[in-house]
C-alpha cells in the first residue's frame, strides 16, 4: 500500500541520515546553483568523490529532480535537495565546503563583466546565507565575474564579522586545466604530465599564464607563446561562441571545480603539499586580491605563493592584468560598500 511505501522510504531516509550523522568519514559539501549547467555535472562528480559524506544540492529551480536522480548513484555520499530561499539555511547548516556556481552565463558578444548586474546580487544573497549558517565553511566561488564576485563575498563576510580570507577562494582552476591541455598539445605531451601556473584573475587579459614556469621545463617560440597566451585567455569565449547562445563552459568547468574542491578537501583532511592556483586575498601585488598558487590546508589557503621569476613578455602582461583587475575588484567592493 501507499502508506507502507511511505514508511519504508522514511525508514530508509532515517538510516541514511543516521549514516551521515554517525560521522561516516568525509566532509559535508553544499552546491548552490546545483540544477544549472555546471551544477548538475558538478553534483554528479561530487557524489562520486570518496571524501564527501553529505552532499546538499540547492537551487531556486529544479533541485528536487536533480537530487532524486543523483541520489540513486550507489556511492557513499548522502544526498539531500533544497529548493528556494526559505531552504537556504538548512542547505548550508553544518557544511565544511560550499561551492557556488549560481548565476547567469555569457552569450556570444558579452564580457564576463556584463554578468555583474544579475550575478552580484545572487552572490551577495548566498554569501549572507553562508555568514549566517556556516561561517567557518570553505567557499569555492565560481559565479562570474569572479574578479568582482570574490571581493563582493569578502565584503559581505566582513560586514557580518566572520571574514576569514583563507576560507574564500575564487575558482580559476579552469584556466589551469585549459593551459595544461593547450600547452601539452603544443609540446606533444600527455596533459597529465604538464603543469602551467596561471595567475592574475579570471577574465581576458587578467588571465596570465606563466609559460616560463611550465613543468616540465620547456621552451617556446615567440609565436607559440602568443598563440598559447591568446588561446588560454580566450578559452571561455571559444566555448561561448561554439555553444552559440546556449551557454558557456559547463562540463570542463564541472571537471575543474571538482579537481579544485577535491584539493580543498584533501587540505582540510590535513594532507601535505596540496597546491593549486586560486583567486584569493593576497599581498603578492599591490592589489587586495590576486590569483597565484596557494597551499591548501586545514584552514583553507594557508600559504599564498609569490609569482616567481617572470620574463619580459609576462611582466608586460602582468601590468595589463593589474590595471583591469584593480577596476573589477573596486566594482565588487563598492557594490556592497555603497
Ligand atoms: P546556468 O544558467 O546553466 O545555471 C545557473 C544556475 O544557478 C541555475 O540552475 C539557476 O537556477 C541557479 N541560480 C540562479 N539564481 C540563484 C540563486 N539566487 N540561488 C541559487 N541558485 C541560483 O549557468 P552555468 O553555465 O551553470 O554557469 C553558472 C555561472 O558560472 C555563470 O555565472 C558562469 O559565468 C560561471 N562560470 C564560471 C567559470 C569559472 O571558471 N569560474 C566557468 C564557467 C562558468
Ligand atoms: C569560462 O572561462 O569558461 C567561464 O568564465 C565562462 C565564460 O563566460 O567564459
Image: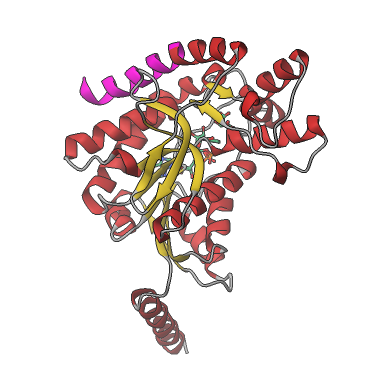
- The answer to if 296 sits in the magenta stretch is no
Q: Nearer the viewer, residue 159 or 222?
A: 222
State whether residue 218 appears in this view: yes
Image coordinates of residue 280 in percent, x first then y, are 39, 33
Residue located at (36% from left, 21% from top): 329
Query: Considering only vertical position in the picture, is 164 above or below 308?
Result: below
Image coordinates of residue 311 in percent, x first then y, are 60, 15
Q: Nearer the viewer, residue 324 or 266?
A: 266
- The answer to if 337 sits in the magenta stretch is yes
Residue located at (44% from left, 49% from top): 61
Query: Considering only vertical position in the picture, is 91 above or below 290?
Result: below
Residue located at (52% from left, 35% from top): 172
Residue 189 placement: quadrant: top right
Q: How is the image coloured?
A: secondary structure
Q: Which residues are magenta?
A: 323-338
- In the image, 216: left or right of 261? right
State whether residue 99 appears in this view: no
Image coordinates of residue 77 in percent, x first then y, are 48, 69
Q: Main secondary structure of the magenta part?
A: helix
Q: Nearer the viewer, residue 267 or 159?
A: 267
Residue 167 placement: quadrant: top left
Tally the marks: 0
Image coordinates of residue 130 in percent, x first then y, are 28, 47
Q: Quadrant of the C terminus?
A: top left
Query: Considering only vertical position in the picture, is 26 above or below 116?
Result: below
Residue 298 placement: quadrant: bottom left
Residue located at (60% from left, 17% from top): 109
Amino acid at each position: 500500500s501507499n502508506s507502507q511505501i511511505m514508511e519504508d522510504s522514511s525508514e530508509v531516509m532515517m538510516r541514511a541520515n543516521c549514516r551521515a550523522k554517525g560521522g561516516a568519514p568525509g566532509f559535508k559539501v553544499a552546491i548552490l546553483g546545483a540544477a544549472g549547467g555546471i551544477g548538475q555535472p558538478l553534483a554528479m562528480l561530487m557524489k562520486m568523490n570518496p571524501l564527501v559524506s553529505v552532499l546538499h544540492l540547492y537551487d531556486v529551480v529544479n533541485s528536487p529532480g536533480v537530487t532524486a536522480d543523483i541520489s540513486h548513484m550507489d556511492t557513499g555520499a548522502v544526498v539531500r535537495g533544497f529548493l528556494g530561499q526559505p531552504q537556504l539555511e538548512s542547505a548550508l547548516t553544518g557544511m565544511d565546503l560550499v561551492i557556488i556556481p549560481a548565476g547567469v552565463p555569457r552569450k556570444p558578444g558579452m564580457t564576463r563583466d556584463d554578468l555583474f548586474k544579475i550575478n552580484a546580487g545572487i552572490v551577495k544573497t548566498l554569501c549572507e546565507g553562508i555568514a549566517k549558517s556556516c561561517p567557518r565553511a570553505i567557499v569555492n566561488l565560481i559565479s562570474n565575474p569572479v574578479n568582482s564576485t570574490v571581493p563582493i563575498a569578502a565584503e559581505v563576510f566582513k560586514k557580518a564579522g566572520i571574514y576569514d580570507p583563507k576560507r574564500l577562494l575564487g575558482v580559476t582552476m579552469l584556466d589551469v586545466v585549459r593551459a595544461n591541455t593547450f600547452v601539452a598539445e603544443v609540446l606533444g605531451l600527455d596533459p597529465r604530465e604538464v603543469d602551467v601556473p596561471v595567475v592574475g584573475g579570471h577574465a581576458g587579459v587578467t588571465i596570465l599564464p606563466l609559460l616560463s614556469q611550465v613543468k616540465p621545463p620547456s621552451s617556446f617560440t615567440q609565436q607559440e607563446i602568443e598563440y598559447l597566451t591568446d588561446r588560454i585567455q580566450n578559452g571561455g569565449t571559444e566555448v561561448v561562441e561554439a555553444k552559440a547562445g546556449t551557454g558557456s563552459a559547463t562540463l570542463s568547468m564541472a571537471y575543474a571545480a571538482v579537481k579544485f574542491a577535491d584539493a580543498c578537501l584533501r587540505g582540510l583532511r590535513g594532507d601535505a603539499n596540496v597546491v593549486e592556483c586560486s583567486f584569493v586575498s593576497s599581498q603578492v601585488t599591490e592589489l587586495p586580491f590576486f590569483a597565484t598558487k596557494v597551499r591548501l590546508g586545514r584552514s583553507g589557503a594557508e600559504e599564498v605563493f609569490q609569482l616567481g621569476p617572470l620574463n619580459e613578455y609576462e611582466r608586460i602582461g602582468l601590468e595589463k592584468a593589474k590595471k583591469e583587475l584593480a577596476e573589477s575588484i573596486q566594482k565588487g567592493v563598492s557594490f556592497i560598500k555603497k
